[in-house]
Image: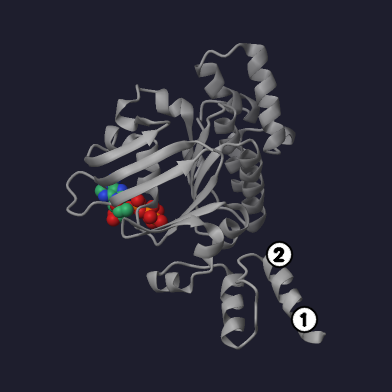
Amino acid sequence: MGIVIEFKDVSYSYPLTKEPSIKNLNCKLEKGKFYGVIGKNGSGKTTLCTLIRGFAPSFYQGVLEGQVLIEGKPTVDHGPGELSLKIGYVFQNPFNQISGVKETVFEEVAFGLENFGVPVDEIERRVIEVMELTKISHIAEKNPFELSGGQQQRVALASIIVLKPDILVIDEPTSQLDPEGTESVFEIIDALKREKKTIILVEHKIDLIAEYADDVMVLDNGEMIRFGPKQAILSDMSLLEHGIQLPQMAILGNELVKQGVKLDYIPITEKQAKEVIGRTLRKESV
Ligand SMILES: Nc1ncnc2c1ncn2[C@@H]1O[C@H](COP(=O)(O)OP(=O)(O)OP(=O)(O)O)[C@@H](O)[C@H]1O
């Protein structure tokens, strides 16, 4: 798979701050992969998203050292609007995403396409398709502001997905949602992964990252302290010392190993836990 985003020796400081919010970042993100970004509050996760979108330094100003490359081209060399076509950004709070000028969900989802001058019949086709994917067809005629938080977040996602960006940067989309709303947002993100979109998701709900992401990036005080396949990272108990949450199943698995239970690997999801603990119990009962 090709490299779609690359950080080359990137450090970034907001204006009037002494310490960089991102320090010496080097990494390559592959097309079609789902990256979970985790770290304590203030570790630099949102700043990382802002760098990918090119908003730092273009909007926030500040000092950028090194290069953030999107499809091989530095963000600072992309023309105005060019990055916003390639990269869809979903806010933490859907209220910030919803335009406030449209009276129905259908119109809201169509809004971006109208702005890009897409022909009416294509708009209709694309909006219907995306509303099915995000399971909001049944609320097409409702006012976006009369919806539940979970429905609003699905509308916000739909209004971005309909623009067909190759890269999706999603910053804590479920922080305001109940478990049901959260699960439905993850199901949509999973569907986007099947469509080979590159996904960068900031999320505190670590059990869901364990289930859905491919790779994980761990930030601590602006530094990337781990980056790679989720299995090894999310079962690494030393991360607890950095204040990083780990999946419940990894903590359970680790506790069992400490008590002398022989597990073939440390599980990070419920499915893996059932599988690996079941295997051990079967071996022991023979
Ligand atoms: N606009 C800004 N101006 C100055 N400093 C900022 C700005 N935005 C963030 N920072 C600082 O940059 C550092 C990283 O912040 P950032 O918001 O990227 O962290 P985060 O991991 O996303 O945190 P959270 O989980 O709380 O959203 C923090 O020290 C923060 O105070």
Which quarter of the image is occupied by the N terminus? top right
Q: Name the foreground residue: 15 vs 86.
A: 86
Q: Name the foreground residue: 48 vs 41.
A: 48
Chain-order first, disc 2 or disc 1: 2
> In the rendering, which numbered label is found on residue 283?
1
Q: Residues within 10 Å of mark 1 (few under 14, many from 20)?
A: few
**What is the C-alpha distance between the residues marked 2 and 1?**
18 Å
Judge depth for marks 2 and 1 and give the one in front: 1
Residue highlighted by disc 2: 271
User: Which residue is at a point 35% across and 43% down the rendered structure image?
Assistant: 7
User: Which residue is at a point 62% across and 39% down the rendered structure image?
Assistant: 192
Q: Is residue 140 left or right of residue 60?
A: right
Q: Is residue 147 left or right of residue 21?
A: right
Q: Which kind of residue does numbered mark 1 sit on?
A: Lys
Residue 207: horizontal and vertical position, in percent?
59, 62
User: Which residue is at a point 66% across and 48% down the rendered structure image?
Assistant: 184
Q: Which kind of residue does numbered mark 2 sit on?
A: Lys
CB of mark 2 near ligand 1 (< 8 Å): no
